[in-house]
Image (cartoon, helix red, strand yellow):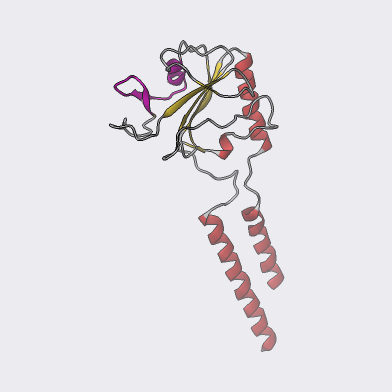
Amino acid sequence: MLAAVLFAATTILVPVFAQASPSPATGTAQAKAIDDCLKADNVWVFVITEDETVLSNQCVDSPASGAEALDKAGVTVQNNKTGLICTMNDHPATCPKTFTGQYWAYYHASGAGAPWEYSQKGADQYKPAAGSIEGWCYNKPKTKSCTPPKLAAGSAEGSSFNLTTAHSTGASSSNNGVMSGPVATIAVIAVIVIVLVAALLVRRRHQS
């Protein structure tokens, strides 16, 4: 009986403790998507908040400006009185009445693997080059600035960011079916209790 319980516990614990790391296939798929987008002379748009919520991570075709690239990527923006973008997809919910130190930083990358360059123009004035990447990030409180993470491009090797490692808006972090967080903790406790009870029952049976 104890052996059967231990086998069941092992069956449950193995997926619980499995490493919740990004699937290589997923990283490769995104790398290929970015590579194909840039080779087709389109533009890749990447937008991320300070808590790594991804608002956009996709290819758009021939945007006339950075603002149009955001629009084609499904990102809704609001501008403050000076014309600068202050919210994206209601993040933050409204434009701050006074500057808090947090803002949407605008970057460009000339191609796959190229370093981010801080934009010298606003989204309305800048025209993204064909085969380039547009990047936006919102800095954390009490930090001076932010830089978008390096994207998987060309191949999965050397990539440091893909959708499986970020919290996409409205998406659940199931880690490809692997339990994590409170669910995993509860499962482990339940299994330990079952094993202890089973061991106690076997001991009493041997003593009787």
The magenta span reads 66-87
Residue 123 in the image: x percent, y percent? 43, 17
Outermost bottom residue: 208
Q: Is residue 52 above or below residue 43?
A: below
- Depth check, front residue: 91 or 174: 91
Kindly tell me whether residue 1 is visible in this rendering.
no
What residue sits 32% from the left and 20% below the top? 82
Q: Reply above or below: 61 against 93.
A: above
Residue occupying image coordinates x 42% and y 19%: 71
Residue at x-position 58% and y-position 38%: 164
79 sits left or right of 44 in the view: left
Q: Residue at x 53, y 30 (%)?
A: 148
In the image, 178: left or right of 94? Answer: right
Is 29 in the magenta?
A: no
> Taking 14 as reference, is 70 left or right?
left
Q: Quadrant of the C terminus?
A: bottom right
